[in-house]
């Protein structure tokens, strides 16, 4: 029987943000799609595709006690660099955001203070290569960062003492004969 602690009974939200129509801008969404494909989570963990909803996420994110955000993060670093931002590092990023959804999302997070319900937040992601080209495919180098960032999300769940398990992979053969 799993030991129930305060941390692992809180509402934990894993939120992917970005626009899948602009190459690496959709990175956060692709990571949570992979996460849902490979893992099962307890009832207190929700996985949300936030897309480019920005301010419209205010109600959703205010429901969380712990918030793990996955996104492409422009940080003027080397393409493919992995980032983990928390606490004071998050507000500093408002000035450096390169897309409207990112600004709106951070403003929504700030407005949670008015609701007196600000989740503890960690943002993980990757320095994108291309967020301007109209394409539903990630660039090849950024595609290789999905699993490392997925592992960062799992590390956050471990830190929060949340159990999860890998789904059993079905070996299905489609032989028509």
Image (cartoon, rainbow, N blue to C red):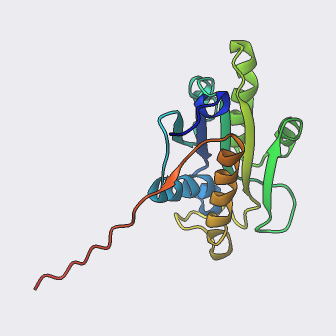
Pinpoint residue 120: horizontal percent, then vertical percent.
Answer: 74, 31
Q: Residue at x 64, y 56 (%)?
A: 25
Q: Name above or below for residue 79 compared with residue 42.
A: below
Q: Position of residue 81 (x, y in %)?
A: 80, 65
Q: Report which quarter residue 68 is drawn in.
A: top right
Q: Identify the residue shown where x is 89% and y is 36%.
A: 88
Q: Quadrant of the C terminus?
A: bottom left
Q: Is residue 84 left or right of residue 24?
A: right
Residue 17 in picture, x, y percent from top left: 61, 46
Q: Nearer the viewer, residue 29 or 104?
A: 29
Foreground pick, 46 / 169: 169
Which residue is depicted at the point 25% across and 78% down? 173
Visible residue check, residue 155: yes
Query: x, y (%) of residue 85?
Result: 81, 46
Q: Residue furthest bottom?
A: 177
Q: Is residue 80 left or right of residue 157?
A: right
Establish if 141 lies above or below 126. Answer: below
Does residue 20 appear in this view? no
């Amino acid at each position: 029987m799993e030991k129930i602690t305060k941390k692992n009974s809180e509402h934990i939200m894993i939120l992917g943000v970005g626009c899948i129509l602009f190459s690496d801008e959709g990175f956060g969404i692709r990571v949570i799609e992979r996460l849902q494909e490979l893992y099962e989570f307890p009832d207190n963990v929700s996985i949300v595709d936030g897309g480019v909803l920005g301010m419209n996420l205010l109600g959703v994110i205010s429901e969380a006690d712990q918030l793990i955000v996955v996104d492409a993060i422009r940080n003027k670093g080397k393409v493919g660099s992995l980032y983990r931002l928390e606490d004071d590092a998050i507000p500093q990023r408002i000035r450096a955001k390169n897309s409207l959804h990112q600004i709106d999302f951070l403003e929504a997070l700030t407005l949670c203070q008015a609701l007196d319900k600000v989740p503890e937040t960690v943002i993980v992601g990757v320095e994108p290569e291309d967020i301007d080209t109209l394409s539903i495919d990630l660039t090849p180098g950024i595609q290789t960062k999905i699993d490392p960032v997925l592992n960062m999300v799992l590390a956050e769940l471990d830190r929060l003492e949340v159990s999860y398990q890998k789904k059993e992979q079905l070996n299905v053969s489609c032989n028509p004969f």
